[in-house]
C-alpha cells in the first residue's frame, strides 16, 4: 500500500555539515491515507523544519521523502499537485479581496477556468466568508485570515493538507471553527498533517500522533494509547475551603502523591493510583476541619504524556504556567 | 514532445502569467515601486541633462534608456523580499511549477513595468523634445529586450534571501548607478578613451543606450544585432544567480 507520506532517515542540518545546527535527526515515519496525523512538539523541536522539507520548501541534508508514491528528490512536480499548505502565518495577499485571493490560487494550481468561481463560492460559503468576499484581506480579523488561508490551500482539492499551528492566537470560537473545518476536510477524504505544540488540539483531532523533540521522534501512536502508556501521570484535582498555601506541602506528602501543583483555586495531585488517594484526601480534610468543595480524578493528558516520554517533569509544565499566570504556584513537589 | 510535456509547458506559462498579473495588481502602486521604478529614471535624467547642450533626439534616447534601466530593475528587489516577509512567497515556491517558471513570472512583472513607464516616457519625450523615431521596430525590440535584461538583473538582487526590501534595494541601486556611470549614457561612447570604452562594454546599459541611439537618432556605434544579442544573453545570464540563490536559500532554510 502506498502511504500518503513516507519518510526515511530524514535529516536537516542548518549551516555546514559538521559545524551546523542539527534541526531534524534521522526521522522516519509514515502517514496513512485518510488519517489526521499530528506532529507534536515544543517550539524548536524540528516540527516546522520537517514540514518545510515535506512541502519542498527546504532541501533535506539526508533522507528520503515520498509523497503519494512520488520521491520528492526526483519527482516533486506530481507530489506538489497533491499538496495543500497552510503555514503558521496566514499567507494571504492583504491587498487582494478574499474572492481574488481564491481565484489567484485556483489559477496558480491550474484549476479548470470554468470551475474556479464555483469552487471559490463554495469555499467562501463553507468558511463563513461569502459576505466578505469583496473585502480586502488586510481588513480581516486573524481568524478570518486563517479561514481564508485554509480555503486557499484546498481550492485545488489536495489529497494531502499540511497545517502548521492552525489555531494559536485565535479566540476560542475561531479555534473551534478551524478545528471543525479540519474534521470536515478529513471526513471528506483529505489526509491531514497537523503540526502543533498544543497537545489538547492533537488529542482532539488526530488519529495518530508523532512526538518530536530535539529533532528526534520519541514515539508515534494514537493519543489514547499514549495516554494509557503513562498511567503514572494521572491526577486528582481538588478544591478545599478554606484554601491556603500550607496545604500544598501537606498534600504533597500524602502517600502515593508524586507532585502537588496549585492551579488557580484548586490543587492537582499527581499519582499512579487515584482511587487509593481519594480516601487519604478525605481523611486529610476531615482531620484539618476543611470542606472539600470539589474532587475530580483526571485522566492523564497528552501534555503530561509528552513530558514523560521526552524526559521532562510534570512539574516543569507548571513552571511554564506560572510564568503565564502568576497566581498559580507550585507547592511541596516531590517528583 | 509528448502531449504531457506540452500540457506541462502550457501550464507553466499560464502560471508565470498568473504570478505576473497578481504582482501587477498588488505591487505597481506601492511607494517602493513608484520611488525606485517610476521617479528614479526621471530624477536621473533631469539631474544630468538639464542645462547641458542636448539635442532633442539625443535627449529622448537617453530618457528611454534610463527609464528601461531603472524601472525594470525595481520590481525584483522590492517584491520578493516583501513576499518573503508576509509569507506569500512560500505559497509560490510550494506551488506545482518550476522555479524557472516562478522567476520568469517575476521577470515579466519588472519588464511590464518598464515597458509601461517607457511608453509614458516616450510620449512625454516626444511632446517635450518634439523628436521623431527613426526605427520604431528597433525601438520596440530595444525596450522589450532591455526590460527583460534589467528585470532579471533586479531579480538577482531580489533573490538574496532577506525579508527586508531595504536590504537589497540599496545595493541594487548602487550597482545600477555604477553601471550607469560606466555606460555610454551621459558620455557618448565615441567620446570615451579606449580604456573607458572597454569598461563601458561590460555594462548591458551601454548596449541599451546604443540601441536607443539607433532607434531614435538613426545611428549608433555598435551594430544593432549585437546590441540585441547582448541584451538577450545578459538577461538569460542574470537568471543564473537568481536560480543559484533560491537553491541556496532552500538548502540554508532562509
Image: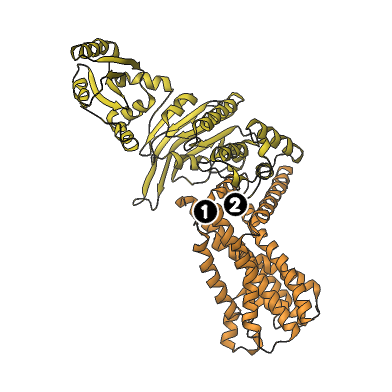
Q: What letter labels the chain drawn in orange? A: B
Q: Which secondary structure lies at badge 2? A: helix
- Identify the chain of the residue marked 2, using the numbered disc in the image: B
Residue underneath mark 1: B247
Inspect this view and state whether residue A329 appears: yes
Q: Position of residue A182 (x, y in %)?
A: 55, 29
Verify CB contact (< 8 Å) between mark 1 and mark 2.
yes
Q: Position of residue A100 (x, y in %)?
A: 68, 45
Along the horizontal axis of the image, is A155 left or right of A57?
right
Q: Please name the residue shown 64% across and 34% down the image.
A: A157
Q: Please name the residue shown 62% across and 82% down the image.
A: B48
Q: Please name the residue shown 61% across and 81% down the image.
A: B47
Question: Mark 2 or mark 1, which is nearer the start of the sequence?
Answer: 2
Q: Position of residue A26 (x, y in %)?
A: 40, 38
Q: Quadrant of residue A284?
A: top left
Residue underneath mark 2: B99
- Identify the chain of the residue marked 1, using the numbered disc in the image: B
Q: Quadrant of residue B34?
A: bottom right
Q: Position of residue A325 (x, y in %)?
A: 34, 35
Vertical placement of residue B242 versus A141, above or below: below
Along the horizontal axis of the image, is A133 left or right of B131?
left
How would you rate the neighbour count of disc 1 (Cα within 10 Å): few for under 14, some for 14-19, many for 20 or more? some
How would you rate the neighbour count of disc 2 (Cα within 10 Å): few for under 14, some for 14-19, many for 20 or more? some
Q: What letter labels the chain drawn in yellow? A: A
- Distance between mark 1 and mark 2 Cα atoms: 9 Å
Q: Which secondary structure lies at badge 1? A: helix
Amino acid at each position: 500500500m502506498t502511504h500518503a507520506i513516507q519518510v526515511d532517515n530524514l535529516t536537516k542540518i542548518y549551516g555546514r555539515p559538521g559545524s551546523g545546527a542539527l534541526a531534524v535527526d534521522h526521522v522516519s515515519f509514515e502517514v496513512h491515507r485518510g488519517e489526521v496525523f499530528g506532529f507534536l512538539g515544543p517550539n524548536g523541536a524540528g516540527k516546522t523544519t520537517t514540514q518545510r522539507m515535506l512541502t519542498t520548501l527546504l532541501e533535506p541534508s539526508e533522507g528520503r521523502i515520498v509523497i503519494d508514491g512520488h520521491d520528492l528528490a526526483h519527482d516533486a512536480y506530481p507530489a506538489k499537485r497533491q499538496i495543500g499548505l497552510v503555514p503558521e502565518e496566514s499567507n494571504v495577499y492583504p491587498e487582494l479581496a478574499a474572492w481574488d485571493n481564491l481565484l489567484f490560487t485556483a489559477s496558480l494550481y491550474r484549476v479548470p477556468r470554468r470551475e474556479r468561481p464555483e469552487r471559490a463560492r463554495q469555499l467562501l460559503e463553507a468558511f463563513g466568508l461569502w459576505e466578505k468576499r469583496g473585502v480586502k484581506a488586510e481588513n480581516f480579523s486573524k481568524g478570518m485570515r486563517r479561514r481564508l488561508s485554509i480555503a486557499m490551500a484546498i481550492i485545488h482539492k489536495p489529497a494531502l493538507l499540511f497545517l502548521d499551528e492552525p489555531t494559536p492566537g485565535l479566540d476560542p470560537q475561531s479555534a473551534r471553527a478551524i478545528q471543525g473545518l479540519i474534521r470536515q476536510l478529513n471526513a471528506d477524504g483529505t489526509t491531514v498533517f497537523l503540526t502543533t505544540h498544543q497537545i489538547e488540539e492533537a488529542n482532539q483531532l488526530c488519529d495518530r500522533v508523532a512526538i518530536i523533540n530535539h529533532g528526534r521522534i520519541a514515539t508515534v501512536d494514537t493519543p489514547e494509547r499514549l495516554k494509557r502508556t503513562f498511567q503514572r501521570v494521572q491526577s486528582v484535582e481538588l478544591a478545599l475551603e478554606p484554601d491556603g498555601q500550607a496545604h500544598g506541602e501537606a498534600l504533597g506528602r500524602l502517600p502515593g502523591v508524586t507532585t502537588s501543583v496549585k492551579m488557580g483555586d484548586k490543587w492537582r495531585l499527581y499519582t499512579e493510583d487515584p482511587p487509593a488517594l481519594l480516601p487519604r484526601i478525605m481523611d486529610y480534610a476531615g482531620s484539618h476541619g476543611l470542606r472539600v468543595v470539589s474532587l475530580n480524578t483526571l485522566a492523564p493528558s497528552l501534555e503530561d504524556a509528552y513530558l514523560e516520554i521526552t524526559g521532562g517533569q510534570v512539574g516543569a509544565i507548571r513552571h511554564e504556567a506560572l510564568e503565564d499566570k502568576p497566581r498559580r504556584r507550585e507547592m511541596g513537589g516531590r517528583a | 514532445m509528448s502531449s504531457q510535456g506540452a500540457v506541462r509547458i502550457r501550464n507553466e506559462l499560464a502560471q508565470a502569467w498568473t504570478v505576473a498579473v497578481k504582482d501587477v495588481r498588488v505591487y505597481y502602486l506601492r511607494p517602493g515601486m513608484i520611488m525606485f521604478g517610476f521617479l528614479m529614471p526621471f530624477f536621473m535624467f533631469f539631474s544630468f541633462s538639464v542645462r547641458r547642450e542636448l539635442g532633442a533626439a539625443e535627449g529622448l534616447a537617453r530618457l528611454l534608456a534610463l527609464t528601461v534601466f531603472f524601472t525594470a530593475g525595481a520590481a525584483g528587489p522590492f517584491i520578493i523580499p516583501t513576499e518573503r516577509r508576509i509569507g506569500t512567497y512560500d505559497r509560490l515556491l510550494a506551488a506545482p511549477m518550476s522555479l524557472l517558471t516562478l522567476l520568469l513570472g517575476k521577470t515579466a512583472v519588472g519588464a511590464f513595468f518598464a515597458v509601461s513607464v517607457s511608453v509614458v516616457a516616450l510620449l512625454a519625450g516626444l511632446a517635450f523634445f518634439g523628436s521623431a523615431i527613426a526605427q520604431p521596430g528597433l525601438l520596440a525590440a530595444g525596450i522589450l529586450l532591455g526590460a527583460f535584461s534589467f528585470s532579471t538583473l533586479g531579480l538577482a538582487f531580489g533573490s538574496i534571501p532577506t525579508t527586508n526590501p531595504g536590504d537589497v534595494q540599496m545595493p541594487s541601486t548602487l550597482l545600477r548607478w555604477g553601471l550607469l556611470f560606466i555606460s555610454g549614457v551621459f558620455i557618448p561612447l565615441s567620446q570615451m578613451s579606449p580604456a573607458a570604452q572597454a569598461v563601458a562594454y561590460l555594462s548591458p546599459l551601454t548596449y541599451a543606450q546604443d540601441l536607443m541611439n539607433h532607434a531614435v537618432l538613426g545611428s549608433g556605434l555598435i551594430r544593432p544585432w549585437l546590441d540585441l544579442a547582448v541584451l538577450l544573453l545578459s538577461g538569460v545570464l542574470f537568471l543564473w544567480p537568481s536560480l543559484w540563490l533560491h537553491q541556496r536559500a532552500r538548502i540554508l532554510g532562509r
